[in-house]
Amino acid sequence: MKPNILLAETQTPNGSRMTLVEHDGSYCIRVNGQQLMHSSVSTSEVHLGALGCEHHTKAKAGLRVLIGGLGLGFTLKSVLQSVGPKAVVHVAELFPEIVEWNRTHLAKLNGDALKDSRVKVFVKDVRALINHAPREPYDCIILDIDNGTTAMVAIENHELYSEAGVRRIADATKSGGRATIWSACPDGVLEKRMKRAGLAVTAVPSKLYATAKRAAYMIYVGDKAAATPAK
């Protein structure tokens, strides 16, 4: 049996131990030994990126995309495959170590996505970009923070999906744009909050891996109505 190889580690804001482990060509990020994300079950992360941009894949002008949470880079890779050459893709990642892991240990896994000229990485809480965004809103906001709406890494992540937090996400989304949120399980409270924020919401089941018989996760797709042109 091939061993687990510890490649790197860091500490989260709440004092938990976060590690990057490789086993037989697969990679896993763990928090206190509990799996947070794994490269062999990345289908939902790819699905998230595709859903987030699906209405804008043929956009000719420069599309503005915000991804909250870099993880193993699968969502970013999916977005880059979906959008055009003039797109601008902002990635907010709280941990500089995860950014470094993506540039080094995970570069082959996600196709060196961080080297793409369309990508700009912000090592900060995604809420900072969302709060600033109403001045220049995003066409697509794609969020996979922590363990979805259940925080494992930083308790502050609960605030992102609070009533006020969801309203800010909607405000940061351009008219006619889309906000997409990954969840580890069905979350009726989140769905209601998105609707109250003025988004037309669709709950899309998503699988652990492509051949799975059932969908373990849920992706909440919130579309913002296009503004009616003034007469």
Image: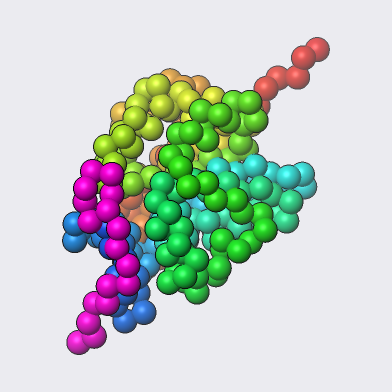
Residue shown at the point (29%, 70%) measured from the top left? 21
Residue 212 in the image, given as x and y percentages of width and height: 33, 64
Q: On the rendered structure, is 228 left or right of 93?
A: right
Q: In which quarter of the image is the C terminus?
A: top right
Which quadrant of the structure image shows residue 96?
bottom left
Q: On the rendered structure, is 137 left or right of 207?
A: right
Q: Which of 182 and 13 is in front in this view?
A: 13
Colour convention: rainbow
Q: What stretch is highlighted in magenta?
A: 1-17
Is residue 47 among what the camera can see? no
Residue shown at the point (48%, 47%) measured from the top left? 123
Is residue 167 among what the camera can see? yes
Q: Is residue 9 above or below residue 183?
A: below
Q: In this view, does 107 lie above or below 161?
A: below
Q: Which of 5 and 218 is in front in this view?
A: 5
Residue 61 in the image, given as x and y percentages of width and height: 77, 44
Which quadrant of the structure image shows residue 196?
top left
Q: Is residue 15 magenta?
A: yes
Q: Nearer the viewer, residue 153 or 140?
A: 153
Q: Nearer the viewer, residue 98 or 186?
A: 98
Q: On the rendered structure, is 216 left or right of 67?
A: left
Q: In which quarter of the image is the N terminus?
A: bottom left
Residue shown at the point (56%, 29%) measured from the top left? 132
